[in-house]
Image (cartoon, rainbow, N blue to C red):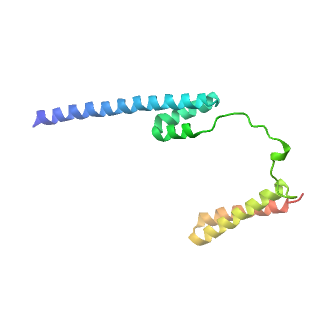
Amino acid sequence: MESFYSGLYTILQAYIIAVLVGYFVGGLLFGLACRAIVKNKGYPNDSCVRNAIGGFFLWWIWLIVCVCKPDARPIHYSGADVVRLDGMSDTRFWGFLLSGGAILLLGCALLFKTWWGLAVAATGLVWWIAMYANTGK
């Protein structure tokens, strides 16, 4: 029986090593492919490295993400491209956004009845009051 388990252990070690090497080689291939795709689309080098790391770990999923990315080209905005609500300042916009978030947090805290939810809701409420006080100034 000793030789049977010894042989099984040797086969298991060889299998584990083969699987790890296979995953490493596959990760390298997908990482390099993702980097090449993103580089050809005109993205900067740091973005290419991040996408290569994503390709190394996520294989097909990240390759599909890289293929679906749009080409990187500089975007030039004109004044007509800026969308602004009629007469609404940035401070007022953030005040409305934070008030909606505070109401949502307070509702979730009351729904789930947790102490940390109430603490987060209280913090959001204080932030909402501070933003509302500065609205229009």
Q: Nearer the viewer, residue 11 or 85?
A: 85
Image quadrant containing the N terminus: top left
**Residue drawn at the location 65% of the way across and 62% of the way down:** 120
Residue at the far right in the pictured view: 137
Give residue 130's quadrant in the image. Answer: bottom right
Give the x, y percent position of residue 28. 45, 29
Q: Nearer the viewer, residue 22 or 134?
A: 22
Give the x, y percent position of residue 59. 46, 37
Is 39 positioned to the left or the right of 56 in the image? Answer: right
Give the x, y percent position of residue 102. 70, 64
Is 102 positioned to the left or the right of 93 in the image? Answer: left
Q: Can residue 94 be seen in this view?
A: yes
**Residue drawn at the location 61% of the way across and 68% of the way down:** 109
Give residue 127's quadrant in the image. Answer: bottom right
Image quadrant containing the C terminus: bottom right
Q: Nearer the viewer, residue 59 or 110?
A: 59
Give the x, y percent position of residue 52. 53, 32
Is 33 positioned to the left or the right of 69 in the image? Answer: left
Q: Is residue 127 visible?
A: no
**Residue drawn at the location 21% of the way across and 32% of the way down:** 11
Residue at the far left in the pictured view: 1
Q: Say how many tags the image has.
A: 0
